[in-house]
Each structure stands twice: as C-alpha cells, then as structure tokens.
Amino acid sequence: QQQVKQSPQSLIVQKGGISIINCAYENTAFDYFPWYQQFPGKGPALLIAIRPDVSEKKEGRFTISFNKSAKQFSLHIMDSQPGDSATYFCAAPDTGGFKTIFGAGTRLFVKA
Amino acid sequence: NAGVTQTPKFQVLKTGQSMTLQCAQDMNHEYMSWYRQDPGMGLRLIHYSVGAGITDQGEVPNGYNVSRSTTEDFPLRLLSAAPSQTSVYFCASRYTSGNINEQFFGPGTRLTVL
C-alpha cells in the first residue's frame, strides 16, 4: 500500500515569509500529486495539483515542486499571509489508482 | 449544485449504539469515499466505491459498513459504536477518469462515542 510521509507536522511563519511543506511517497505507479487545504471546521479543498511530466507548477503564491528521482514533492507558499493559516495535506493514489492516501497533515500558522 | 452534503453535522452516541452517517453528491461522480480525521493521523480511508453496487475497503474499515445503491448516495454505517470511533468523518467524491482527479469533500460529521 502507498505510504505518504509529510513534514513538518506544524509550521510557524512570519507574514511575508515562505512556507515550505514536504511530502515523500513510495509507489511510482501514479500520475497525480495534489495538495489540499483545510480550514478549521471545514472539509479539505483542492489547492493545487501537479502531474509528474512537469517539475514545477505555479498558481499565484502557491508552487508545487516535484522531484521524481527522489520521490518527493513540496508545496511552497510565497509571501505567506495570516489567511493562509490552515492545515495542508499532500496525497497520492494507491497502487490500483482508486484509493487516495493522504499525508498526516501540516498545521501552518502565519504570524501577522 | 449543492456539491457533497453530509448529515448530521454533530452526533453523540453511547457505546454499542448503531447509526448511519449520510452522504450525497449531485455532481454525478462515480467515485465516493469515506475518511476519518483524527489529530496527528491525517485523513484515513475507511471505505470507497467506484460506482453503484461496487464498494471496497480502505485503510481502516473495521467497525464500518457501506453500500452504494445509487450514484448519488453513499451512507456509512457504524454497527456497534466504540469510543475509538470518536472522530470527524468526511465524505468525498470525484470522477474516476480525467486529467485531474480532484476530490470534493463534504463539511464533515463530528461524532463522539461515550
């Protein structure tokens, strides 16, 4: 079964700083790497996703970097804002492609 | 579109009681799933379905049953509630094909088992 290891568990960043969250996976048989964002009391929502045929994808202040050889992908939040304070999850499909396995989550707090 | 809806929002059960958590989606998604969220454990897959009449187990299926009689609905049944099932439960749905398999999550059900 796919294992997804996410780090750090929690992160405190000053307003305007860069937040970096990392994710490592084991299985190579999949084609989609998403990051989800969850605010307290809400369900997770897709933030940004990347396919493995590209090494980086940027949407506004959010960037995914993908390192296929190291089996890692990371989320970078540039110019972090207090409104970015949330829990972030990486995820990856399992071997069969139907199950989505999530990382343990990273609680981000951006100090004003 | 209402998206993914879940009922109830909150529930308190006594040990041994049974109940059903409801989930419905109006996006005609083939794939539906149930997750539980516990502090420090992330989202763990309980059961999933790739279409009406087809269900399978996830990472933590024990103590839970599911069925999928329609595309829209995917209820989760707790057979005999235990304190270890105290958690926040999320239902999610998505298409099974396409370039980006975005999962859409419901608002969650917060369950406490005493």
Image (tube, helix red, strand yellow):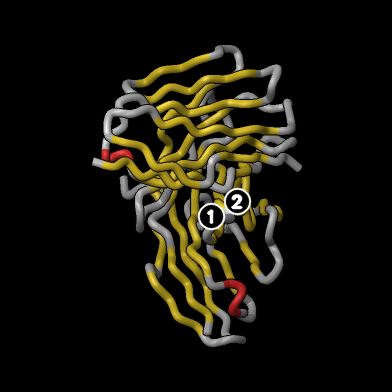
User: Crowding near pointer 2: few (<14 within 10 Å), some, many (20+)?
Assistant: some
Q: Nearer the viewer, residue A54 or B103?
A: A54
What residue do we see at 39% from left, 72% from top?
A: B10
Quarter placement of the N terminus of chain A: top right
- Is residue A84 shown above or below A77? below
Q: How many marks?
A: 2
What residue do we see at 59% from left, 44% from top?
A: A102
Q: Earlier in the sequence, mark 1 or mark 2?
A: 2
Q: Position of residue B19 (x, y in %)?
A: 53, 77
> How far apart are the two marked residues, 1 and 2, measured between alpha carbons?
5 Å
- Is residue B36 shown above or below A48? below
Mark 1 and mark 2 residues within 8 Å of each other at the beta carbon: yes
Q: Position of residue B59 (x, y in %)?
A: 69, 54
- Residue at numbered disc 2: B52
Q: Name the amino acid, label 1.
A: Thr
Occupied quadrant, residue A59:
top left
Residue furthest left in the image: A112
Q: Name the amino acid, label 2.
A: Ala
Q: Is residue A18 left or right of residue A53?
A: left
What residue do we see at 60% from left, 51% from top?
A: B52
Quarter placement of the C terminus of chain A: top left
Q: Is residue B57 left or right of residue B2?
A: right
Residue furthest top in the image: A54
User: Crowding near pointer 1: few (<14 within 10 Å), some, many (20+)?
Assistant: few
Q: Nearer the viewer, residue A72 or B7?
A: A72
Occupied quadrant, residue A41:
bottom left
Circle 1: element type: loop
| Mark 2 chain | B
Q: Position of residue A36 (x, y in %)?
A: 46, 39
Q: Is residue B92 left or right of residue B65?
A: left
